[in-house]
Amino acid sequence: MIRVLLISSLIFLSLGARENPFFPSDGERDILITSNEESDTQPLKRAAITLPSQARVLQKVTIEFKNLDGSVESKSIELSNKVDWHIPIFITQSYAQQENSTQLQAVQQVQKSVPKKESYKNIASIEYLSLLSYQKSLKLVTKDRALRNFMLVNPHRLVIDFKRDSNMKSYVKKIPNSIFKEVRIGNHDGYYRAVIELDGLYRYGFKKIAEGYLIELK
């Protein structure tokens, strides 16, 4: 009789036992599965993303990251800010750089409150045409009438034809560290042509001013 009761007790206890006590039970399935494996991933200091030359407005920034359990998620921030594609977008987790950035913003706010005088620099000249640049603006100082203006690609360049009968020689000048990379001027039948090579893709405005013409890149 005692043997029968002992066997029955063992069978009853085995009904509630786990098949493997080293795995979580049904009520513990939400616990993250982590690992003590050493990772050789380096801490984030600073990373940079370079935008293409046609980029003008930053719409959204998305960061994809790996969680403790190995799953991958992403978070985004919606933006609508103008950007200069010449300057990379930086990603950092350094408080020191954040403080420097805050100080830089304070300086920029002060600088914005002080009116700036436009300072055009002469980048190329011939006898009857001078080209003066300031940031994304280009003055064409001349008394000659512009016949036409248009944009060509590969490479991106502006073309302006001016009315004049001339026997001028071809003129070429490279401009280092400038949006306007190179100026080429050549003589044609009844007009001469100025070609300004750009450092990327732009739209442009062209208007008459007192000194001649003004080109504004956008």
Image (cartoon, rainbow, N blue to C red):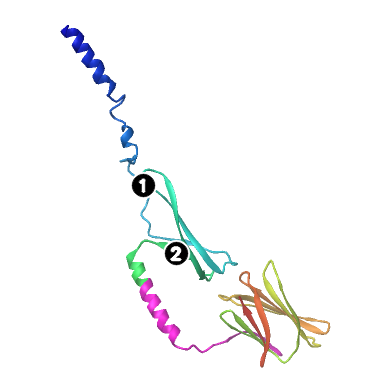
The kind of residue on which mark 1 rests is Asp
Instruction: Tell me what residue is drawn at x 68 percent, y 73 percent.
Output: 157
Observer-nearest residue: 64 or 91?
Answer: 64
Q: Which residue is mark 2?
A: 90
Which numbered disc, 2 or 1, marks the residue that appears first in the sequence?
1
Report which quarter residue 217 is drawn in.
bottom right
The kind of residue on which mark 2 rests is Phe
Within the magenta stretch, is there residue 108? yes
Instruction: Tell me what residue is drawn at x 36 percent, y 75 percent.
Output: 103
Find residue 197 and report its horizontal and vertical position in percent: 66, 74
Find residue 6 and report its horizontal and vertical position in percent: 19, 12
- The image quadrant where one finds the C terminus is bottom right
Label 1 neighbour load within 10 Å: few <14, some 14-19, many 20+? few
Instruction: Tell me what residue is drawn at x 51 percent, y 89 percent.
Output: 117
Find residue 133 and report its horizontal and vertical position in percent: 59, 83
User: Can you say whether 6 is above or below 132 in the image?
Assistant: above
Find residue 83 and report its horizontal and vertical position in percent: 52, 70
Within the magenta stretch, is there residue 170? no
Secondary structure state at the residue bearing disc 2: strand
Find the magenta span and give its range: 101-129
Q: Which residue is mark 1?
A: 40
Instruction: Tell me what residue is drawn at x 36 percent, y 72 percent.
Output: 100
Observer-nearest residue: 14 or 57?
Answer: 14
Report which quarter residue 159 is drawn in.
bottom right
Label 2 neighbour load within 10 Å: few <14, some 14-19, many 20+? few
User: Which numbered marker is on residue 174?
Assistant: none
Farthest residue in the left direction?
2
Secondary structure state at the residue bearing disc 1: loop
User: Can you say whether 117 is above or below 63 in the image?
Assistant: below
Observer-nearest residue: 12 or 158?
Answer: 12
